Image: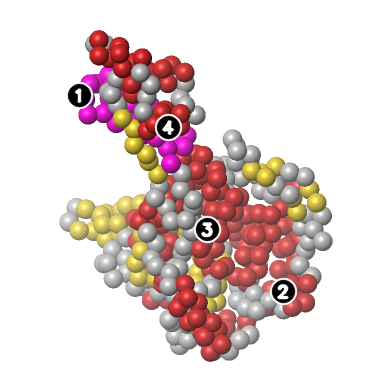
Amino acid sequence: MKKTIWDLIKLLLPMNAEKRHAFEAAAAYLSESDLKLLRQYLKTDRTFPVLQKFHTTPGLFEDKEWPFFKSHLQDDGLSKFLAAMNAQITEKAKREAFLAFGPNALERISGVIAPNIIGMDELKMAVALQLFAKEPVHVLLIGDPGTGKTDLLRSVHAIAPIASFGLGSGTSGAGLSAMAKGDNIIKGLLPLADNGIACIDELNLMRAKDMASLYNAMEKGFVTYDKGSKHEQLPARVRVAATANPSGDTFVGKSAEILRKQIPFDDALLSRFHLIFIVRKPTPEEFERIASNIIRNDKHNLSKEDASFIKEYSQYASGLDVQFDPHHEMDIVAFIRQLKSDERNFIVEIGPRTVVGIMRIVKAVARAELAQSVDKDHLERAFRLVRKSLYVRVPEEKRKSEPKIEKTEQRIEPKTGQKTGQKEEKA
């Protein structure tokens, strides 16, 4: 940097409060050599600081600020230095923010899904978990019209980094798979959501020709298009979030046996969903409480800033490879044994896919909190969610006899985000 006499005088003078504050904040992220050069640029007015933040609402995350440095000068060397330095500061500052958000991530994200719908906490948690599943976790919400199922789908579509939304009837023409337009293949709902979430509303209206494509995408991660001389295999590694209405449009009855007869899908399709929730219209008393909550809370739609933060956070978390400790194997075996004994109370059978789904859900819970390995708390929360999706109504005696899992008193290590602590027995 070529210095003038005036530059030399400026270097002897102290920085103003704004520059000093930004410089001190940047010191937490930069090397000594970068800080030395930054100090010179600040004192000689070649750069000036601005504050960056996510602009999230307090209900989601108490926002974090970090310094960002700009310049009005046309100087290639200065521009390259500032670009590299800003990228380094931003990356480290965002990592700090994500580690702080991690311990409460699932609850916070679930809280902003369909905020106009009061209750349905487990359903919101289920679709939120799909953001953090590396392997497919498929969710089906099946129930009465007007219960808010579609709102949940639209919310997860808004916060997923990669997602598609459409009707099971395939009104787009390309349907769930693909269609040809001249020499071009137009992607349908499933390949458009490759490596993301395919949100399918009214799956009960699915066309017969889309059935095979849905099976392939959910199980194998691709769809095929065959017509004339065209044969295409398109990647569709998706997590499916779907809604459906029962046969006759509204559920009648309460027992699993009666409800099972009103499901408009065969066992082959149902078995591919890892979480299936029966959604019923609220009773008059429940509706009165819902109306009161809506009036008191007057919740608004998710802001663009909140959606952007969740997308960035889920992308960051998706890079984490969660380990499963073999010591937890017996906990899952005991849970499966209990489910198998109650199979008559479910609308689906308990089989190998159930076990696979539980493993994926447990890892997704851990990944959502930036934990590098599964702990007892992750198991309990996953079991609670799976149980809620299976039981039409959980008998009181079953609640009392649920397996007790050893709890862990935990803290979050600031540098790694890992949970550590001493074990204690759950009373």
Given this view, does label 4 or label 1 mark the residue nearer the observer?
Answer: 4
* Residue drawn at point x = 77 percent, y = 45 percent: 422
Sequence order check, earlier mark of 3 and 2: 3
- Across and down, in percent, residue 395 comes to 72, 78
Disc 4 on helix, strand or loop?
Answer: helix
Residue 92 belongs to magenta span = yes
- The answer to which of 426 and 140 lies nearer the viewer is 426
For label 1, the residue is 74
Q: Can residue 84 be seen in this view?
A: no
The magenta region covers 65-93
Label 2 crowd bin: few (<14), some (14–19), many (20+), radius 10 Å: some
Residue 40 in the magenta stretch? The answer is: no
Q: In this view, does 17 lie above or below 421?
A: above
- Residue 384 figure quarter: bottom right
Q: Residue 21 carries which label?
A: 4
Q: What element carries label 1?
A: loop
